[in-house]
Amino acid sequence: MTPGNSMHIRHPADPALARSVALVVASLPTSLSVADDGELAAVAGNGDWCKAAACAIDQGAKGIVVNRPGIVALADLESLIAQAEKAGASAVLRWRWSSHPAVADAVAAWSPVGEGLVLVDTLATGAIDRLGDAVLEQLYLLAQVAGPVRALRLDAHSDDAIIARALTAEGRPVAIGAARSTQPANLTLRLLCATQALELALPDTDTWRPATAFRATIDGESRRPPIYESADRLAWRRLRDAVAGPGSRADLDQFAQALRTLDMMGNVTW
């Protein structure tokens, strides 16, 4: 790639976003840089991030990375998707756990993961601000690894924990949980199949620790090689490729699907 192909990220006003963008640009100096009028923008995923993303598109952004997106109104998200489609803008979501590059690597290595699937179990623990956001991300991750779930229902909910259950498209049981603790935040996804067990252990991407992808069969155990690329770097590479190519709003569409699934639990106060 030549410097002439470089794209520019607008200076983020948020200090945390500014630091992460600076690190990404330092690691990809020939493909990304920072400029006041850049065609790419970073948006913090807290609060009304759909409004912030829509504002960036109105100001001419052709690509947006949303950092750790939280729950929003479905109508606001659908409006953003329509606006992005009309403007030809791309969007990439940078999640707390599921943006580890190990996720796509494991899915490719394990494909098809649905063969002989018996049970799916996913649990997020640690310092979690909003339990609903943790459940939403698990729904998004499940769709990437095992396919979208259905028939989501709430089993138990307290101030510090939530337990829900759902079904895969094939009717296999799915257990979803989130619990606050003083330990480092982690998300673990397990798929139990007739002939193998698969596990993804995802630390908080802000810690830069690599994820672990583990597989056990009757013939023994194996682990995927660790990938040390940061979630931020991967997100911006994906966005740059999308803007340079035909564009992509797949992340927003999948987020909308996860949000609709979350709404199945009814009027839960997060």
Image: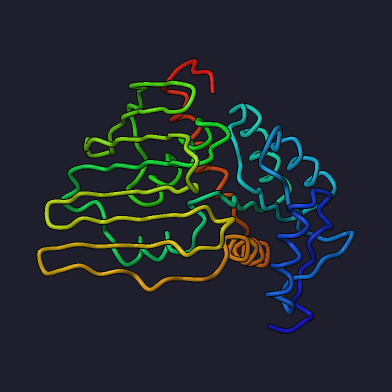
- Which is more toward the observer, 89 or 106? 106
The quarter of the image holding the C terminus is: top right
* Residue 212: % across, % down: 38, 62
The quarter of the image holding the N terminus is: bottom right
- Residue at 79% x, 48% y is 14
- Looking at the image, the residue that sits furthest to the left is 218
* Residue 114: % across, % down: 24, 51
* Residue 55: % across, % down: 80, 41
- Looking at the image, the residue that sits furthest to the right is 36
- Looking at the image, the residue that sits furthest to the front is 182
- Looking at the image, the residue that sits furthest to the top is 267
Above-or-below relation of 146 to 47: below
In-image side of 103 versus 167 (left or right)? right
Quadrant of res 213: bottom left
Above-or-below relation of 121 to 132: below
- Residue at 53% x, 37% y is 128
- Which is more toward the observer, 65 or 215? 215
Above-or-below relation of 224 to 120: below
* Residue 40: % across, % down: 76, 58
In-image side of 223 versus 76 (left or right)? left
In-image side of 259 versus 122 (left or right)? right
- Residue at 64% x, 51% y is 91
